[in-house]
Image: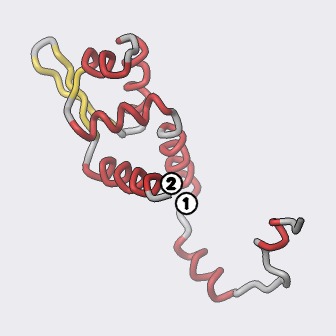
Amino acid sequence: MMDKTIEETCEVTYVDRKKVLSVERKMKDESTVQLLAETFRALGDPTRVKMIFALSQEELCVCDIASLLGATESAVSHQLRVLRNMRLVKYRKEGKMAYYSLDDVHIKNLFDECLRHVEEM
């Protein structure tokens, strides 16, 4: 059996300096890269993914999400706080109710693209 790592790497060492410099000029700063990694980490939890999916469909309150996921309101609130801190969701108050939705259209687009990607696998 052939080692896949050998098949998937170059057989010679050659660095295309022009391509490397082109990408290097476009590379994001460390704080942006860190924030992007943290965003993907926040989306790396199945419960939070379900919440993002639900909120991509409807604006919901904590009670709605807890009922949908079969979780406690406390657990849902904790996860929503994580998502809110990453600016993935936002809320608005209406009387005594707090309604959650995706923070903006970018989050919906990101989620929809990722969903399409995994559904096409």
Residue 93 appears in which quarter of the rendering?
Answer: top left
| As drawn, 9 above or below 103 | below
| As drawn, 34 above or below 48 | below
For the residue labelled by badge 1, is the local secondary structure a helix, a strand or a loop? loop
- Which quadrant holds the N terminus? bottom right
Left or right: where 56 falls relative to 79: left
Q: Residue furthest left?
A: 95
| As drawn, 98 above or below 58 | above
Q: What count of labels does the image hold?
A: 2
Q: Residue at x 30, y 34 (%)?
A: 54
> On the image, numbered disc 2 is attached to which residue?
32
- Residue 37 marker: none
Q: CA distance from mark 2 to mark 1?
A: 6 Å
**Foreground: 119 or 51?**
119
Q: Residue at x 45, y 58 (%)?
A: 120
For the residue labelled by badge 2, is the local secondary structure a helix, a strand or a loop? helix
Q: Residue furthest right?
A: 1
> Circle 1: is it few (<14), some (14-19), or many (20+) Cα within 10 Å?
few
**Foreground: 9 or 36?**
9
Residue 72 appears in which quarter of the rendering?
Answer: top left
> On the image, numbered disc 1 is attached to which residue?
29
Marks 2 and 1 close (CB-CB < 8 Å): yes
Q: Amino acid at mark 2?
A: Thr
Residue 105, given in percent of the width and then of the height, sits at 25, 50
Residue 24, given in percent of the width and then of the height, sits at 60, 74
Q: Residue at x 82, y 66 (%)?
A: 5
Residue 61, given in percent of the width and then of the height, sits at 23, 21
Q: Residue at x 43, y 19 (%)?
A: 78
Residue 28, given in percent of the width and then of the height, sits at 53, 63
Q: Amino acid at mark 1?
A: Asp
